[in-house]
Amino acid sequence: KGGAIKEFLIEIKPYTQCYPPKKPVRETRQHRERVKTFFVNQAKWEAARKAAKKNGMDFIILTERDIK
């Protein structure tokens, strides 16, 4: 409002990496990698949120579904 500038810390990720993968009928190496990627991203995003807040910014994640 009133011409104020808001700064953001933005990360762009594939949509599939932003949500926990669905459990398959049988466990596969690919599924384990997707789970690992999801949890690594969660930890990274928590740290990014804290860093952004500390520096007066907001942190947002964009996916290919957000960018058109």
Image (cartoon, helix red, strand yellow):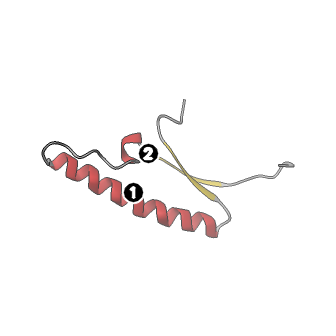
Q: Indicate the position of residue 33 as horizontal and vertical percent values.
A: 23, 52
Q: Pointer 2: residues within 10 angstroms few (<14), some, or many (20+)?
A: few
For residue 13, what is the image quadrant? top left
Residue depicted at 27% across the width and 53% down the height? 35
Residue depicted at 65% across the width and 60% down the height? 57
Kind of residue indicated by mark 2: Lys
Q: Indicate the position of residue 26 as horizontal and vertical percent values.
A: 12, 45
- Residue 16, above or below 55: above
The reply to whether dot 1 and dot 2 touch (C-beta < 8 Å) is yes
Return the mark for residue 41: 1
| Observer-nearest of 27 and 6 | 27
Mark 1 and mark 2: Cα distance apart in space: 9 Å
For residue 49, what is the image quadrant? bottom right
Residue depicted at 28% across the width and 44% down the height? 22
Q: Position of 28 compared to 5: left or right?
A: left
* Secondary-structure class at tag 1: helix
**How many numbered tags mark residues here?**
2
